[in-house]
Image (cartoon, rainbow, N blue to C red):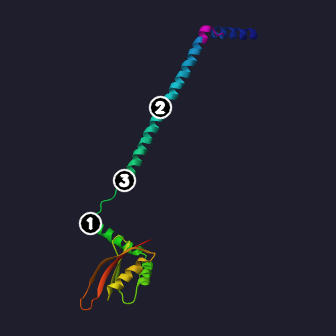
Amino acid sequence: MAGRVFIGQIESIMKFTPQLDLVLTPERRQAIGYLKGLAVALFLLLFLAIYAWQYQTLSARLASLETQKTMRLQASTRVPKVNDSEQKKIGAIRTMTNQLLTPWESLLTAVEQSWSSPLTIVSLSTNSDATTLLITVSAPKFQNIHEFVQVLSEQKMLRYVQLQSEMTQDRKTSEWQAVVQAHWVE
């Protein structure tokens, strides 16, 4: 009896279970195909939307970086304005730098090799362009100055040696004074 009661309970439970129809009819297959197509289409749309959003984000970031780069380049190429006192200081520094870069040892050697006895070298200086040597000399005869210029122009280090100016200091002593200009080759 207990077995029959148990089977009876199972039969009553089975009456309430839904009936599953596992056979696919053509209409159901078509509906499932539409759903699959719809799912693929939604996936592609989602993928394209994410791609478009990333593209816009990266494009905006790239434009921002390009703008920053341009601004930095413009800022780095701006020359600061210099007032007059700073300009004078810069000029003095350039003059000192040119003096330090002047090859004095070779220039003095070239002048010494060109010097002859009656000639007196009064001063040596460089011009503002720092490639021109100015030599002030004095001699009892102009011929001595001319010979000095000739020998000086034969020096390898000097080019364009020329007499810039000459004059007699005193008619009684007939002392000649001249300024010789020469460009040196570095």
Is residue 121 shown in magenta? no
User: Which circle marks residue 52 in the picture?
Assistant: 2
Helix, strand or loop at mark 1: helix
Asked whether the residues under the numbered discs 3 and 1 touch, taking CB atoms below 8 Å apart as contact, a structural biologist would say no
Residue 75 - label: 3
Judged left or right of residue 55, residue 20 is right
Magenta stretch?
Answer: 23-29
- Judging depth in this view, the residue of 135 and 168 nearest the camera is 168
Disc 2/disc 3 C-alpha distance (Å)? 34 Å
Give the amino acid type for the residue marked by disc 2 in the picture: Ala
Please check the rendered image and state whether residue 25 is part of the magenta-colored stretch, yes or no. yes
Q: CA distance from mark 2 to mark 1?
A: 57 Å
Q: Earlier in the sequence, mark 2 or mark 3?
A: 2
Image: 2 above or below 167: above
Q: Left or right of 111: which side holds 86?
A: left
- The residue pinned by badge 1 equals 84
- In the rendering, at what x and y percent does residue 24 appear? 64, 10
